Protein backbone atom coordinates (compact mmCIF):
# COMPACT_ATOMS: atom_id res chain seq x y z
CA UNK A 1 0.00 0.00 0.00
CA UNK A 2 2.86 2.39 0.76
CA UNK A 3 4.27 1.85 -2.73
CA UNK A 4 0.86 2.57 -4.27
CA UNK A 5 0.49 5.74 -2.21
CA UNK A 6 3.89 6.83 -3.47
CA UNK A 7 2.76 6.64 -7.10
CA UNK A 8 1.67 9.67 -9.04
CA UNK A 9 -1.97 10.08 -9.98
CA UNK A 10 -1.14 9.26 -13.61
CA UNK A 11 0.55 6.02 -12.53
CA UNK A 12 -2.43 5.13 -10.34
CA UNK A 13 -4.84 5.67 -13.23
CA UNK A 14 -2.65 3.57 -15.53
CA UNK A 15 -2.53 0.84 -12.87
CA UNK A 16 -6.31 1.02 -12.56
CA UNK A 17 -6.81 0.46 -16.29
CA UNK A 18 -4.30 -2.40 -16.28
CA UNK A 19 -6.19 -4.09 -13.44
CA UNK A 20 -9.53 -3.54 -15.19
CA UNK A 21 -8.15 -5.09 -18.38
CA UNK A 22 -6.65 -8.03 -16.47
CA UNK A 23 -9.76 -8.88 -14.47
CA UNK A 24 -11.97 -8.41 -17.53
CA UNK A 25 -9.80 -10.91 -19.40
CA UNK A 26 -9.95 -13.35 -16.50
CA UNK A 27 -13.71 -12.95 -16.34
CA UNK A 28 -14.04 -13.74 -20.04
CA UNK A 29 -11.71 -16.75 -19.64
CA UNK A 30 -13.68 -18.34 -16.80
CA UNK A 31 -17.01 -17.51 -18.45
CA UNK A 32 -15.94 -19.30 -21.63
CA UNK A 33 -14.60 -22.19 -19.55
CA UNK A 34 -17.91 -22.57 -17.73
CA UNK A 35 -19.90 -22.42 -20.96
CA UNK A 36 -17.58 -24.96 -22.57
CA UNK A 37 -17.83 -27.36 -19.63
CA UNK A 38 -21.62 -27.12 -19.67
CA UNK A 39 -21.64 -27.81 -23.40
CA UNK A 40 -19.39 -30.86 -22.99
CA UNK A 41 -21.55 -32.26 -20.18
CA UNK A 42 -24.70 -31.77 -22.26
CA UNK A 43 -23.21 -33.57 -25.26
CA UNK A 44 -21.87 -36.42 -23.12
CA UNK A 45 -25.27 -36.89 -21.47
CA UNK A 46 -26.89 -36.91 -24.87
CA UNK A 47 -24.54 -39.61 -26.16
CA UNK A 48 -25.00 -41.86 -23.13
CA UNK A 49 -28.78 -41.35 -23.13
CA UNK A 50 -28.79 -42.26 -26.81
CA UNK A 51 -27.25 -45.64 -26.02
CA UNK A 52 -29.62 -46.40 -23.17
CA UNK A 53 -32.66 -45.31 -25.20
CA UNK A 54 -31.79 -47.59 -28.11
CA UNK A 55 -31.16 -50.47 -25.73
CA UNK A 56 -34.49 -49.89 -23.97
CA UNK A 57 -36.29 -49.70 -27.31
CA UNK A 58 -34.67 -52.92 -28.49
CA UNK A 59 -36.39 -54.81 -25.65
CA UNK A 60 -39.56 -54.78 -27.77
CA UNK A 61 -37.74 -57.11 -30.15
CA UNK A 62 -36.25 -59.08 -27.25
CA UNK A 63 -32.86 -57.46 -27.58
CA UNK A 64 -30.62 -56.02 -30.24
CA UNK A 65 -30.22 -58.17 -33.35
CA UNK A 66 -27.41 -57.67 -35.86
CA UNK A 67 -26.29 -59.41 -39.03
CA UNK A 68 -22.62 -59.47 -38.06
CA UNK A 69 -21.67 -59.81 -34.39
CA UNK A 70 -18.11 -58.63 -35.12
CA UNK A 71 -16.62 -60.75 -32.34
CA UNK A 72 -19.10 -59.62 -29.68
CA UNK A 73 -20.84 -61.97 -27.27
CA UNK A 74 -23.99 -63.49 -28.77
CA UNK A 75 -26.95 -64.71 -26.68
CA UNK A 76 -28.91 -66.40 -29.48
CA UNK A 77 -29.30 -66.49 -33.24
CA UNK A 78 -32.09 -67.06 -35.76
CA UNK A 79 -32.30 -67.75 -39.48
CA UNK A 80 -35.05 -66.71 -41.86
CA UNK A 81 -36.01 -65.02 -45.10
CA UNK A 82 -35.77 -61.30 -45.68
CA UNK A 83 -39.11 -59.71 -46.60
CA UNK A 84 -37.37 -57.24 -48.89
CA UNK A 85 -35.05 -59.49 -50.88
CA UNK A 86 -36.45 -62.93 -50.00
CA UNK A 87 -32.87 -64.00 -49.28
CA UNK A 88 -31.96 -66.12 -46.32
CA UNK A 89 -30.46 -64.07 -43.52
CA UNK A 90 -29.01 -64.91 -40.15
CA UNK A 91 -29.44 -62.58 -37.19
CA UNK A 92 -27.54 -62.60 -33.92
CA UNK A 93 -28.88 -61.27 -30.65
CA UNK A 94 -26.18 -59.50 -28.71
CA UNK A 95 -25.75 -59.65 -24.98
CA UNK A 96 -26.98 -56.30 -23.65
CA UNK A 97 -23.56 -55.03 -22.50
CA UNK A 98 -22.11 -56.23 -25.80
CA UNK A 99 -24.96 -54.46 -27.56
CA UNK A 100 -23.94 -51.25 -25.83
CA UNK A 101 -20.36 -51.83 -26.96
CA UNK A 102 -21.60 -52.35 -30.49
CA UNK A 103 -23.70 -49.19 -30.41
CA UNK A 104 -20.82 -47.27 -28.87
CA UNK A 105 -18.49 -48.38 -31.66
CA UNK A 106 -21.05 -47.28 -34.25
CA UNK A 107 -21.70 -43.95 -32.55
CA UNK A 108 -18.07 -43.02 -31.88
CA UNK A 109 -16.59 -40.35 -34.10
CA UNK A 110 -13.30 -38.57 -34.56
CA UNK A 111 -13.75 -36.12 -31.70
CA UNK A 112 -15.49 -38.39 -29.20
CA UNK A 113 -15.52 -42.03 -28.13
CA UNK A 114 -18.02 -44.12 -26.18
CA UNK A 115 -16.87 -47.01 -23.99
CA UNK A 116 -18.73 -49.47 -21.81
CA UNK A 117 -16.70 -50.28 -18.70
CA UNK A 118 -17.85 -53.36 -16.78
CA UNK A 119 -14.70 -53.62 -14.69
CA UNK A 120 -15.39 -50.59 -12.51
CA UNK A 121 -18.98 -50.89 -11.23
CA UNK A 122 -18.42 -48.69 -8.15
CA UNK A 123 -20.14 -45.64 -9.60
CA UNK A 124 -23.38 -44.36 -8.12
CA UNK A 125 -23.84 -41.08 -9.94
CA UNK A 126 -22.51 -39.30 -12.95
CA UNK A 127 -19.17 -37.55 -12.78
CA UNK A 128 -16.80 -35.81 -15.15
CA UNK A 129 -13.28 -34.47 -15.26
CA UNK A 130 -10.71 -32.96 -17.61
CA UNK A 131 -7.72 -35.11 -18.53
CA UNK A 132 -5.21 -33.26 -20.68
CA UNK A 133 -7.08 -32.61 -23.93
CA UNK A 134 -9.94 -34.97 -23.11
CA UNK A 135 -13.18 -34.46 -21.28
CA UNK A 136 -14.18 -37.71 -19.56
CA UNK A 137 -17.81 -38.26 -18.59
CA UNK A 138 -18.99 -41.34 -16.68
CA UNK A 139 -22.51 -42.54 -16.04
CA UNK A 140 -23.53 -45.64 -14.05
CA UNK A 141 -25.04 -48.57 -15.95
CA UNK A 142 -27.96 -49.80 -13.84
CA UNK A 143 -29.65 -53.21 -14.08
CA UNK A 144 -33.19 -53.05 -15.49
CA UNK A 145 -36.03 -55.56 -15.77
CA UNK A 146 -34.92 -56.74 -19.18
CA UNK A 147 -31.45 -57.53 -17.85
CA UNK A 148 -32.86 -59.56 -14.93
CA UNK A 149 -35.29 -61.58 -17.07
CA UNK A 150 -32.62 -62.29 -19.68
CA UNK A 151 -30.15 -63.58 -17.09
CA UNK A 152 -32.83 -65.71 -15.47
CA UNK A 153 -33.62 -67.32 -18.83
CA UNK A 154 -29.99 -68.04 -19.69
CA UNK A 155 -28.35 -71.02 -18.03
CA UNK A 156 -25.10 -70.21 -16.29
CA UNK A 157 -25.69 -66.47 -16.42
CA UNK A 158 -24.85 -64.71 -13.16
CA UNK A 159 -27.90 -63.48 -11.23
CA UNK A 160 -28.62 -59.77 -11.30
CA UNK A 161 -30.53 -57.56 -8.92
CA UNK A 162 -32.80 -54.86 -10.20
CA UNK A 163 -31.30 -51.40 -9.69
CA UNK A 164 -27.73 -52.48 -8.96
CA UNK A 165 -24.81 -50.90 -10.80
CA UNK A 166 -22.92 -53.28 -13.06
CA UNK A 167 -20.68 -50.86 -14.90
CA UNK A 168 -20.33 -47.42 -16.39
CA UNK A 169 -20.85 -45.73 -19.72
CA UNK A 170 -17.84 -43.54 -20.44
CA UNK A 171 -17.74 -40.74 -22.97
CA UNK A 172 -14.37 -39.34 -24.04
CA UNK A 173 -14.58 -36.01 -25.83
CA UNK A 174 -11.55 -34.36 -27.39
CA UNK A 175 -11.90 -30.66 -26.76
CA UNK A 176 -10.03 -27.57 -27.86
CA UNK A 177 -7.79 -25.72 -25.49
CA UNK A 178 -9.45 -22.74 -23.87
CA UNK A 179 -7.07 -20.31 -25.56
CA UNK A 180 -8.04 -21.53 -29.02
CA UNK A 181 -11.68 -21.55 -27.92
CA UNK A 182 -11.29 -17.96 -26.75
CA UNK A 183 -9.85 -17.14 -30.14
CA UNK A 184 -13.06 -18.42 -31.73
CA UNK A 185 -15.45 -16.97 -29.17
CA UNK A 186 -13.85 -13.55 -28.86
CA UNK A 187 -13.10 -12.37 -32.38
CA UNK A 188 -10.22 -10.11 -33.27
CA UNK A 189 -12.68 -7.31 -33.98
CA UNK A 190 -14.20 -7.49 -30.51
CA UNK A 191 -10.76 -7.55 -28.89
CA UNK A 192 -9.70 -4.56 -31.02
CA UNK A 193 -12.81 -2.58 -30.07
CA UNK A 194 -12.25 -3.38 -26.38
CA UNK A 195 -8.62 -2.24 -26.66
CA UNK A 196 -9.55 0.98 -28.47
CA UNK A 197 -12.26 1.80 -25.93
CA UNK A 198 -9.74 1.30 -23.13
CA UNK A 199 -7.21 3.56 -24.87
CA UNK A 200 -9.84 6.26 -25.50
CA UNK A 201 -11.01 6.18 -21.88
CA UNK A 202 -7.44 6.40 -20.64
CA UNK A 203 -6.80 9.29 -23.06
CA UNK A 204 -9.84 11.18 -21.76
CA UNK A 205 -8.76 10.70 -18.16
CA UNK A 206 -5.21 11.62 -19.04
CA UNK A 207 -5.93 14.84 -20.93
CA UNK A 208 -9.12 15.97 -19.20
CA UNK A 209 -8.09 15.21 -15.62
CA UNK A 210 -4.44 14.39 -15.16
CA UNK A 211 -2.89 17.06 -17.41
CA UNK A 212 -4.91 19.97 -15.91
CA UNK A 213 -4.09 18.72 -12.41
CA UNK A 214 -0.40 18.42 -13.25
CA UNK A 215 -0.41 21.94 -14.72
CA UNK A 216 -2.22 23.35 -11.68
CA UNK A 217 0.18 21.57 -9.35
CA UNK A 218 3.15 23.15 -11.14
CA UNK A 219 1.62 26.63 -10.91
CA UNK A 220 0.84 26.25 -7.20
CA UNK A 221 4.41 25.08 -6.63
CA UNK A 222 5.70 28.27 -8.26
CA UNK A 223 3.41 30.30 -6.01
CA UNK A 224 4.77 28.52 -2.95
CA UNK A 225 8.26 29.55 -4.04
CA UNK A 226 7.24 33.22 -4.08
CA UNK A 227 6.11 33.80 -7.67
CA UNK A 228 2.71 35.42 -7.18
CA UNK A 229 2.55 36.67 -10.77
CA UNK A 230 1.89 33.19 -12.13
CA UNK A 231 -1.04 32.94 -14.53
CA UNK A 232 -3.51 30.21 -13.58
CA UNK A 233 -5.63 30.89 -16.67
CA UNK A 234 -8.81 31.66 -14.73
CA UNK A 235 -8.52 35.40 -14.07
CA UNK A 236 -11.73 36.23 -15.92
CA UNK A 237 -13.74 33.27 -14.65
CA UNK A 238 -15.99 32.82 -11.64
CA UNK A 239 -17.11 29.64 -9.94
CA UNK A 240 -20.66 30.13 -11.24
CA UNK A 241 -19.44 30.00 -14.85
CA UNK A 242 -18.15 26.43 -14.78
CA UNK A 243 -18.99 23.00 -13.43
CA UNK A 244 -15.44 21.72 -13.80
CA UNK A 245 -14.11 20.91 -10.33
CA UNK A 246 -10.51 21.48 -11.40
CA UNK A 247 -11.36 24.94 -12.74
CA UNK A 248 -13.22 25.74 -9.53
CA UNK A 249 -10.14 24.72 -7.57
CA UNK A 250 -7.99 26.92 -9.80
CA UNK A 251 -10.38 29.86 -9.27
CA UNK A 252 -10.13 29.41 -5.50
CA UNK A 253 -6.33 29.32 -5.73
CA UNK A 254 -6.44 32.43 -7.93
CA UNK A 255 -8.46 34.19 -5.24
CA UNK A 256 -5.86 33.12 -2.69
CA UNK A 257 -3.08 34.40 -4.99
CA UNK A 258 -4.74 37.80 -5.29
CA UNK A 259 -5.23 38.03 -1.53
CA UNK A 260 -1.63 37.09 -0.91
CA UNK A 261 -0.39 39.62 -3.42
CA UNK A 262 -2.58 42.33 -1.86
CA UNK A 263 -1.18 41.51 1.56
CA UNK A 264 2.38 41.75 0.27
CA UNK A 265 1.63 45.12 -1.36
CA UNK A 266 0.14 46.44 1.88
CA UNK A 267 3.18 45.28 3.81
CA UNK A 268 5.47 46.96 1.29
CA UNK A 269 3.51 50.24 1.61
CA UNK A 270 3.71 50.11 5.41
CA UNK A 271 7.44 49.55 5.26
CA UNK A 272 7.84 52.60 3.02
CA UNK A 273 5.87 54.78 5.46
CA UNK A 274 8.04 53.65 8.32
Image (tube, rainbow, N blue to C red):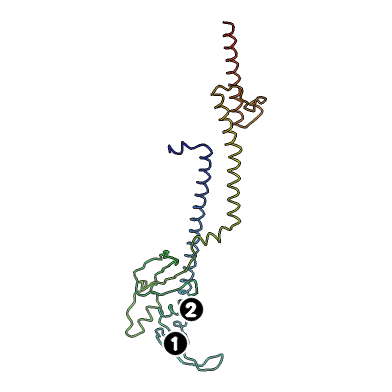
Q: Which residue is mark 1?
A: 92
Q: Position of residue 88 (x, y in %)?
A: 50, 94
Nearest the viewer among 85 and 183 is 183
Q: Which residue is mark 2?
A: 106
Separation of disc 2 and disc 1 at Cα? 17 Å
Q: Would residue 265 appear left or right of 92 to someone viewing this image?
A: right
Answer above or below: position of 58 versus 121: below
Could you tell which of marks 2 and 1 lies nearer the N-terminus?
1
- Which residue is at a point 46% across and 88% down the rendered structure image? 91
Q: Quadrant of the C terminus?
A: top right
Residue positioned most to the top: 274
Which type of secondary structure does the marked residue at label 2 adopt? Answer: helix
Q: Position of residue 22 (x, y in %)?
A: 50, 49
Answer above or below: position of 134 versus 19: below
- Which residue is at a point 48% across and 63% down the rendered structure image? 177
Q: Position of residue 73 (x, y in %)?
A: 39, 84
- Which residue is at a point 34% across and 69% down the rendered structure image? 122
Nearest the viewer among 268 and 68 is 268
Which type of secondary structure does the marked residue at label 1 adopt? Answer: strand
Nearest the viewer among 40 and 87 is 40
Answer above or below: position of 212 versus 238: below
Q: Position of residue 136 (x, y in %)?
A: 43, 67
- Badge 2 density bin: few <14, some 14–19, many ≥20, Cα 10 Å: few
Q: Quadrant of the N terminus?
A: top left
Determine which of the numbered discs, if any, sits on residue 164 in the image. none
Answer above or below: position of 33 versus 203: below
Amino acid sequence: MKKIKGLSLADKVALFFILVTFFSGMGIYFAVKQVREKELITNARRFSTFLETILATSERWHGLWVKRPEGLKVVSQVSGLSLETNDEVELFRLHDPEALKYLASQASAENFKLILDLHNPVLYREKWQFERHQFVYQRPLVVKKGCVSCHEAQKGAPPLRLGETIGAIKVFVHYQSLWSLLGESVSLGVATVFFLVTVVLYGLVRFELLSPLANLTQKVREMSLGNLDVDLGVRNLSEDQTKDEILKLAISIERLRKSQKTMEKMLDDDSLVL
